[in-house]
Image (spheres, grey):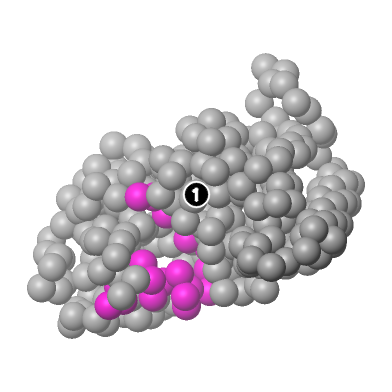
Amino acid sequence: MVNTILCPLSGAPENEGTLDKAYSVAKDLKSHLEVLHVEPEAKESIPLLGEGMSVSMVEDMIGMAEKEARSRADSARAMFDASVIRHGVDVADKPSGERKVTVSWRHEHGREDEVLARIGRLNDLIVVARPGDSDDVLTPMTLNAAIFESGRPVLVVPPGGTASIRKRVAISWNGSVQSARAVSAAVRILEQAEAVMVLTADSFRTSGARGTELASYLEWHGVKPDTQIFEASAGSVGPRLLEECEKFGADLLVSGAYTHSRMRQLILGGVTKHVLGHAKIPMLMAH
């Protein structure tokens, strides 16, 4: 059940597409959307101060950091205000008891990753932008905090994409704990989908037979998915998975995140790393 959704907003122009996607999900699921901006402390947002720097130089650097932080905060708030008007959604800080879409604004101070992890734990879903699509240096840090520190499912949004994420849903299934968590988080979306496809790689790590096991489980939720087993050699599961998503016409990929060692994937590559870098559709992930 997704009743509350969190969307961090840094104030960068690229955030607008991610925010619109968060609204789309909130409307689909009749959920409350909390838009969060974390304003960093100026002293923590500047490089380490070197020896020999004068007091005036330090003060100038802190002043510049404070000015930049205020500018981002103002941009984020303006983006939020414009989105409320654009989407025609009521602003509400408390639940009314009625199942409908609402939105609220939250402004916090501190380290974005730490604040996001803390507040994210009190939301059902976190919506973030995909790293690499923006010059916003906070994006990779935000994603890592959402996936590894919040304990919540994360919707990773690439630029552009379809308006809906619940018409044709693909599931990457390998039987892992992370995959199970992602499917559990997506059940309500799967129940509303027009078509669901379970994709399983027949590789040296995964048996293709596991897809039918998931299909049998989903039938108890009223979901009747198709299953597809695709062959993939070591190192090719990520590309082949995205090929199958494209063939199916998926507008959402449900997948476990970093089902193998995170360090191994960062160094040697892996399915999660490839999908995060190349997917053209939103990804609902859980670790």
Q: Nearer the viewer, residue 67 or 59?
A: 59
**How far across and down, in percent of the image, does residue 184 sit?**
36, 41
**How far across and down, in percent of the image, does residue 262 sit?**
31, 62
Locate residue 185: give its quadrant.
top left
**How far across and down, in percent of the image, does residue 271 sit?**
32, 71
Q: Is residue 169 left or right of residue 127?
A: left
Residue 59 vertical position relative to residue 223 in the rendered view, above or below: below
User: Which range of residues does the magenta coloring cover?
Assistant: 268-287
Residue occupying image coordinates x 71% and y 38%: 108
Q: Is residue 212 visible?
A: no
**How far across and down, in percent of the image, does residue 36 sit?**
69, 43
Residue 175 vertical position relative to residue 161 in the rendered view, above or below: above
Q: Name the element at disc 1.
A: helix
Residue 98 vertical position relative to residue 221 in the rendered view, above or below: above
Rate crowding at label 1 as few (under 14), some (14 to 19) or many (20 or more) other CA atoms within 10 Å: many
Q: Nearer the viewer, residue 40 or 115?
A: 40
Query: Which residue is denoted by mark 1 in the rendering?
Result: 146
Is 240 within the magenta? no
